[in-house]
Image (cartoon, rainbow, N blue to C red):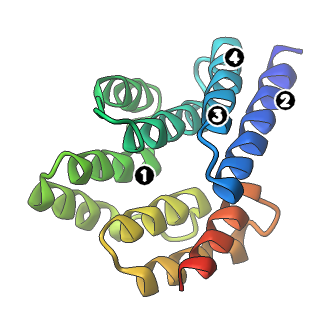
């Protein structure tokens, strides 16, 4: 029952995140984070849930007046302890480095995982967002296109794809 309840909270978080991507209303990020936090409380060992929570906190910090990525880094460390080779978290590490202005380190992080993505839709989505950070929208579109083929039902991937289409 706890796993099912954790899954439900994770899905609620994904719903709120989709609403944020569609509307730009940051209040949805707070709701998404709360849902992911509850999912993580119920299932602490699920790297996907921890990643969703971490990604949402990263988004919240990106739009904050004075971003502080401390919690994001702590959550990434939790993911690394749970599943050391979880590629999306390693890409998110690069995005944090990029947000902190550490471009060379960020690029190195992206290159170190790019060959490991293969058929991982979540990693492809994370890579698409990293490419967007770098202003490489055609690379981002290609990564999200591959992710959409792998997981056409994933609302987060679909919302990011729609957002990318609007930017083009």
The residue at which mark 2 appears reads as 8
In 3D space, how far apart are the residues under numbered discs 2 and 1 (Cα atoms)? 24 Å
The residue at which mark 1 appears reads as 87
- Label 4 element class: helix
Q: Is residue 30 left or right of residue 14?
A: left
Tell me the crowding category of disc 4: few under 14, some 14 to 19, or many 20 or more residues within 10 angstroms, Cα based: some
Specify the quadrant of the image occupied by residue 164: bottom right
Task: Tell me the mark number nearer the camera, choosing from 4 and 3.
Answer: 3
Between 94 and 15, the one lying in front of the other is 15
Q: Is residue 118 above or below residue 16?
A: below
Between 118 and 156, the one lying in front of the other is 156
- The first of marks 1 and 4 along the sequence is 4
Where does the image place residue 88, in percent across and percent down from the top left?
A: 46, 51
Task: Tell me the mark number nearer the camera, choosing from 3 and 1.
Answer: 3
Q: Is residue 135 above or below residue 157?
A: below
Between 96 and 1, the one lying in front of the other is 96
Between 120 and 153, the one lying in front of the other is 153
- Label 1 element class: helix
In 3D space, how far apart are the residues under numbered discs 1 and 4 (Cα atoms)? 23 Å
The residue at which mark 4 appears reads as 38
- The first of marks 2 and 3 along the sequence is 2
Q: Is residue 152 left or right of residue 159?
A: right
In 3D space, how far apart are the residues under numbered discs 4 and 3 (Cα atoms)? 17 Å
In 3D space, how far apart are the residues under numbered discs 2 and 4 (Cα atoms)? 10 Å
- The first of marks 2 and 4 along the sequence is 2
Which mark identifies residue 35? none
């Amino acid at each position: 029952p706890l796993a099912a309840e954790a899954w439900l909270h994770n899905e609620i978080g994904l719903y709120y995140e989709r609403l944020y991507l569609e509307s730009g209303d940051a209040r949805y990020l707070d709701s998404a984070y709360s849902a992911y936090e509850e999912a993580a409380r119920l299932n602490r060992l699920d790297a996907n849930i921890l990643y969703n929570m971490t990604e949402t906190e990263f988004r919240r910090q990106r739009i904050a007046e004075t971003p502080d990525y401390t919690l994001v880094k702590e959550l990434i460390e939790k993911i690394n302890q749970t599943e050391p080779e979880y590629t999306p978290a390693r890409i998110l590490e690069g995005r944090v480095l990029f947000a902190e202005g550490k471009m060379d380190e960020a690029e190195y992080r992206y290159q170190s995982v790019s060959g490991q993505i293969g058929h991982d839709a979540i990693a492809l989505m994370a890579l698409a967002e990293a490419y967007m950070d770098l202003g490489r929208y055609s690379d981002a579109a290609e990564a999200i296109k591959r992710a959409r083929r792998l997981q056409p039902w994933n609302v987060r991937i679909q919302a990011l794809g729609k957002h990318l289409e609007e930017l083009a």
